[in-house]
């Protein structure tokens, strides 16, 4: 877990992934409604990413590619990535993709993430710099958390640029330059 106290990282690592147990396990208590605390070899169980990752490192499970990176999603992104609702598939699509790719040994996920981000990036910046664009539109609802942060940063940068251009302070004196040196004599 790279960002231990980051709430978005914690939520992202709770994303469920389908895992297949390579070894039998007892006393795991994964399903509280189950009468037995035993998982047989070959059992398919949906686990949170953080647990599946740890069990994969211990070679206790194999992890399947999550549904948000399946072939249907890949073909939709290749056709028109700007119109694909990535938020409904996975709110942290890019970050989760970067973390899941080495676990499932699927190199196509990295290519998918790059192509999706490149084409959606242009659209996000265009919408962020358009004055008439309202934040409550349909476009806003299909953005992932990472894309929303990018959008908000672009809007803020554009607002700062317009403020500067309309007569804001042209130059600011650095705080270090405003201080006088004390004489050492």
Image (cartoon, rainbow, N blue to C red):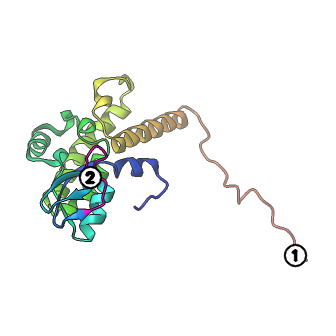
Question: Which residue: 27% across, 42% down?
Answer: 90
> Does residue 102 show up?
no
- The answer to if 31 sits in the magenta stretch is yes
Q: Where is residue 36 in the image (x, y as percent from the top left)?
A: 25, 52
Gap in Å between the C-alphas at discs 2 and 1?
67 Å
| Vertical relation: 122 (above or below) 9 | above
Residue extending farthest right: 185
Q: Position of residue 29 (x, y in %)?
A: 31, 54
- Residue 59, by quadrant, is bottom left
Q: Is mark 1 on a helix, strand or loop?
A: loop
Circle nearer the N terminus (2, 1): 2
Residue extending farthest bottom: 185
Query: Which residue in the structure is indicated by mark 2?
Result: 47
Q: Which of 177 and 6 is in front in this view?
A: 6
Residue neighbourhood size for the residue with mark 2, other residues' Cα within 10 Å, grouped as few (<14), some (14–19), many (≥20): some
> Does residue 101 show up?
yes
User: Which disc number belongs to residue 126?
Assistant: none
Q: Which of 7 and 169 is in front in this view?
A: 7
Left or right of 11, for residue 101: left
In terms of secondary structure, what is the magenta stretch mainly?
A: loop
Question: Which residue: 38% across, 47% down?
Answer: 11
Q: What element carries label 2?
A: strand
Quadrant holding the N terminus: bottom left
Residue neighbourhood size for the residue with mark 1, other residues' Cα within 10 Å, grouped as few (<14), some (14–19), many (≥20): few
Q: What is the magenta range? A: 26-35
Q: Nearer the viewer, residue 80 or 180?
A: 80
Q: Where is residue 97 in the image (x, y as percent from the top left)?
A: 25, 53
Residue extending farthest front: 35
Query: Which residue in the structure is indicated by mark 1?
Result: 184
Number of numbered markers: 2
């Amino acid at each position: 877990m790279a960002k231990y106290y980051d709430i978005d990282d914690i939520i992202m690592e709770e994303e469920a992934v389908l895992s297949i147990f390579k070894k039998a396990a007892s006393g795991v208590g994964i399903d509280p409604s189950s009468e037995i605390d035993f998982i047989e070899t070959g059992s398919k169980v949906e686990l949170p990413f953080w647990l599946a990752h740890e069990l994969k490192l211990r070679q206790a499970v194999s992890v399947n590619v999550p549904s948000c990176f399946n072939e249907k999603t890949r073909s939709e992104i290749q056709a028109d990535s700007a119109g694909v609702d990535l938020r409904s598939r996975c709110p942290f699509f890019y970050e989760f993709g970067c973390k899941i790719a080495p676990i499932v040994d699927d190199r196509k996920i990295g290519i998918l993430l790059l192509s999706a981000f490149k084409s959606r990036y242009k659209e996000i910046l265009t919408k962020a710099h358009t004055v008439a664009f309202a934040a409550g539109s349909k476009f806003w609802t299909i953005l992932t958390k990472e894309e929303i942060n990018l959008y908000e940063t672009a809007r803020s940068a554009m607002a700062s640029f317009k403020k500067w251009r309309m007569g804001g302070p042209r130059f600011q004196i650095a705080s270090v330059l405003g201080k006088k040196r004390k004489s050492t004599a």
